[in-house]
Amino acid sequence: MLHRLMLLAVLLTLPLLALAWQSGGVPVCTDPSSQTGPQIAKLSDGFAVVWTEHRRGNYDIFAQKLDGYGHGLWQLNGNAVCDHDSSQQNPIVVEGNNGGAIFFWEDNRSQYPPWPYVDVWGQRFNCMGQDGWVHNGREYSFSGDASWGPAAIPDGAGGAFMVNVMRQLPDGSGLYGYHLDSLGTALWAGGIGQGTFLGTMAARVHSDGAGGAIVGWNENHPSLGSCLFAQRLTLSGMPLWDSAGVRLVQFSTPQYSISYAFVSEATHGTIGVWDDTLRNGTWDTYAQRISGNGTVRWLVNGIPVRVAQGTQRNPKAVTDGAGGAIIMWEDGASGLRDIYAQRVDSTGARLWDTLGVPVVSSTGDQTGIQVVSDDAGGVIVTWKDNRNGNNDIYAQRLNPNGQRLWDTLGVQVCAWAGEQTVPVMCQDGSGGAVIAWQDTRNGNNDIYAQRISASGSGVWRDSQGSFQPLTSNPSFSVVPNPFTSFATLPGHEFEHFALYDISGRRVGTYRGDRVGANLPPGMYFLRPEAGSSKPLRVVKIR
Ligand SMILES: [Ca+2]
Ligand SMILES: [Ca+2]
Ligand SMILES: [Ca+2]
């Protein structure tokens, strides 16, 4: 009992320590070359961050996997997803199976003349960051034509459903989809909503919550003009709605750079939100709902979420779990960019203040919104913020009533010197979120990350720069690794080592001749009982 009380006392002091510590997050990649455009995905046992990389003198794709503590599990500064001598850029990442990750990017190595276009390529890494498909990736393009702008969801079986935009002769473009298995082989590939259109842009895809996909695209159609479309598909490419797609909105003039987002739910279909211009003379935020069977549910061409002076732009949304959505946008009504939010129910009624509620209305510009559900009917939002004279990363959480749950001005995810930009975010599986961003604190573009708890605390500590990804101390080797029954540490058979699971829970202490005996399969950290407190190795039990 006394021990429990002491432990409780220690735990109670932790939040105070956390408040006193101004963490800048943990480094994901600090190579002196330039790292840009991060993307992030939650994996079964950690988080994958991918970015565009220039350390080898041309653009490549690198990635790192972080555990629940922010420790890098792969090589220091990341593993090469693709370092072919051609140019790779704009990567995305989705969860693979067994702690692995699947990546897609744009790659110009094929360069089909006469157009210097790119194609979409992909790769899977296993949990240890090793190539799962062909080294440097597989190409996903029909008949050797150009493709770009990949978006993807995991298929739940170790593969992915990916959509991209492909050039169509003579000078149009169409939306194409691929269901890839865990080896990257196409189980299905084909066109989606194919018509005779002038141009398809901006592919999106979400799970429909029932084993299929909801895809979205912006299309400049020869007779309909510029429209936003959505389609629900099985992963075998069978359309479940009107074969031409369902229109969310038909714009009165061609639109080439519409910012839009979707949420989706199994029983309620999808809600799309977009920048709408020319209807009222300025940019406004509109939304439309399509039911699960493909029926347009709200006003033709959508309902106004926020119509006001100035620009309302770049909306993002999450499902509210009840058939509605929480929608956020950059609001320029004050002259500067602030962030506002509104919740709409399944009928399209606005549930919060008619004008929307301010998420942050600090001085400076708040832009670059990213949102995830807090899985409690509310939302976590992160953004780029220049209130302090240079760009920083902030975050906030709203409850289902639109009330701010964290510091009124938002919590500082990273407010260090230099430019922190391009925040990206995923859920952390515990009601919080993991945020990664581009960071110039070291004088060149790097990638950093931070985990924010459900209560708004920065969880990961960089120990003022002493953070080290797992060391590769050559005096400790784990043989074999991965293993099935137990592993040994040659030369350290009689020392004691602790193993921690991926959530940081200590699961046992082992002698170096019998590490991990009787533990269930999974990823673990190995740490000496004496001496260095840093984790030494990831061990994998099969
Ligand atoms: Ca390259
Ligand atoms: Ca800064
Ligand atoms: Ca760098």
Image (cartoon, rainbow, N blue to C red):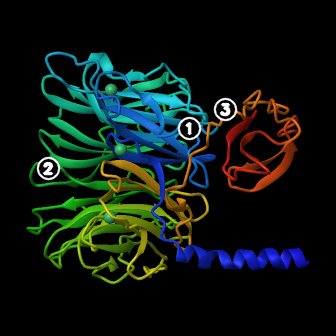
Estimate the x, y position of residue 184 in percent, counting from the top left. 50, 24
Q: CA distance from mark 2 to mark 1?
A: 42 Å
Q: CA distance from mark 2 to mark 3?
A: 57 Å
Give, as a three-letter code, the residue at label 3. Pro
Mark nearest the camera among 2 and 1 is 1
Q: Are marks 2 and 1 in contact (CB under 8 Å)?
A: no
The residue under the point 22% across, 71% down is: 337
Estimate the x, y position of residue 503 in percent, counting from the top left. 68, 55
The residue under the point 68% across, 40% down is: 537
Q: Is residue 139 left or right of residue 434?
A: left
First of labels 1, 3 by sequence position: 1
> At numbered mark 1, what does the secondary structure look like: helix, strand or loop?
loop
- Identify the disc placed on residue 255: 2
Asked if one can make out residue 152 in the rendered structure from this viewpoint, the answer is: no
Residue at the disc numbered 1 = 74
Q: Is residue 424 left or right of residue 303?
A: right
Name the quarter showing ligand 3. Answer: top left
Q: Are marks 2 and 3 in contact (CB under 8 Å)?
A: no
Mark nearest the camera among 1 and 3 is 3
- Asked where in the image residue 120 lies, by quadrant, the reply is top left
Give, as a three-letter code, the residue at label 2. Gln
Of residue 301 and residue 467, the one placed in the foreground of this image is 467
